[in-house]
Amino acid sequence: MTELTTASNPAALALPVPAALPQTDAVVQLHEWAAELAAARQLAQVLASSSFLPLALREKRKGVPKDMDELTFDAAAVILAGKSVGLDPMQAVQNIFPVHGMPSMYARTMVALVIGQGHGVKRSAATDDSVTYSVRRKGEEQWQDFTWTIARAKKAGYTTNAKYQSDPIAMLGAKAAAEACRTVFPDILLGMAYSAEEIELEDMGERVPATQSQAPGQSATARLAAAAQTPQPEAAPAVEATEPLCSRAQQTALGNALKALGHTTKDEMLAVVTAWVGRDLTGSKDLTVGEAKQLTDELEAEAAERNQAAEDVVDADGVIPTVVDADADAAWLAGTN
């Protein structure tokens, strides 16, 4: 072919059209998954406008509702997560909810899924001080025991929750059942990394000062509680802030959040805040705007998770009320009382 004929025939320069991508099993599955997602979103839109979504799914944290789009997207994801473990849409939205970007499930739902696959789960011992769940896989003879005691719950920092005094068997039983199911039946639970009652067992990324020592696996609340029992050094002059100091309203909000987690005295609250920020303080008034907001958000999120988990374990109708003296708390932290 000469340059002249090429110039007179532009089509000769065209690149060949590539063949269509082969429809492999993986590609087909992705198309099917996308179709399922679209269908799940349609269902989620209807459910989001109904009264059938639980508070744990409707709220970002206690008292802070999600907007309609966020609620719809979360409900759609929950429906798909439920499908992966054999739950229909209504079962999924009642038993699964997202926490820190991961699907979480109630302990009783884990037990139901395991039993539904023909495996064995039984509560083999239960007192106010200790609950044991025994499990075994289908076809096996040996049972494996998983026990939660009040001493273990206290060490983990959970017994400040009033439910451990009013209904310890239900609380300890939920911990033992979830641990047993996750350990022995991971193939059934698939991506359900946490139970609602187990969220506090893992460090979910709460801020811990570099100077604060911590034991492996210890929760943020447990670390803060330990810090509250440790004698604090005499307060040094506050570090010069690179941003404005927090407002009175932020101090009040922080006091509320601390009280909700059971930190009720001036010394205890100041110790918790000092341990978190990693420097000596005379009161919460020494925190910057950003520090006060971050700590308050973390404490409120943890309190909401605790209350919701405790509520659903015992099938209660409402969150345990917490009496908060906001003015007194803020005064304690500010060093004015």
Image: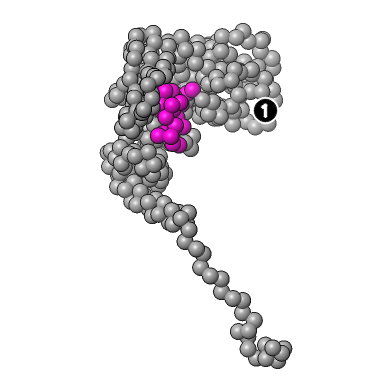
Residue 314 in which image quadrant: top left
Residue identified by numbered label 1 = 241
Residue kind at label 1, given as amino acid type: Ala
Is residue 14 within the magenta segment? no
At horizontal 56% and vertical 74% (from top left) the residue drawn is 17
At horizontal 44% and vertical 32% (from top left) the residue drawn is 186
Whether residue 112 sits left or right of residue 184 in the image: it is left
Residue 94 in which image quadrant: top left
Whether residue 287 sits left or right of residue 95 in the image: it is right
Mark 1: which secondary structure? loop
At horizontal 48% and vertical 37% (from top left) the residue drawn is 101
Residue 31 visible in the current orientation: yes
Q: 232 or 215, which is in the foreground?
A: 215
Give the magenta-colored segment's residue range: 178-201
Q: What is the x, y in percent for residue 225?
A: 53, 14
Q: 213 or 260, which is in the foreground?
A: 213
Q: 235 or 73, which is in the foreground?
A: 73
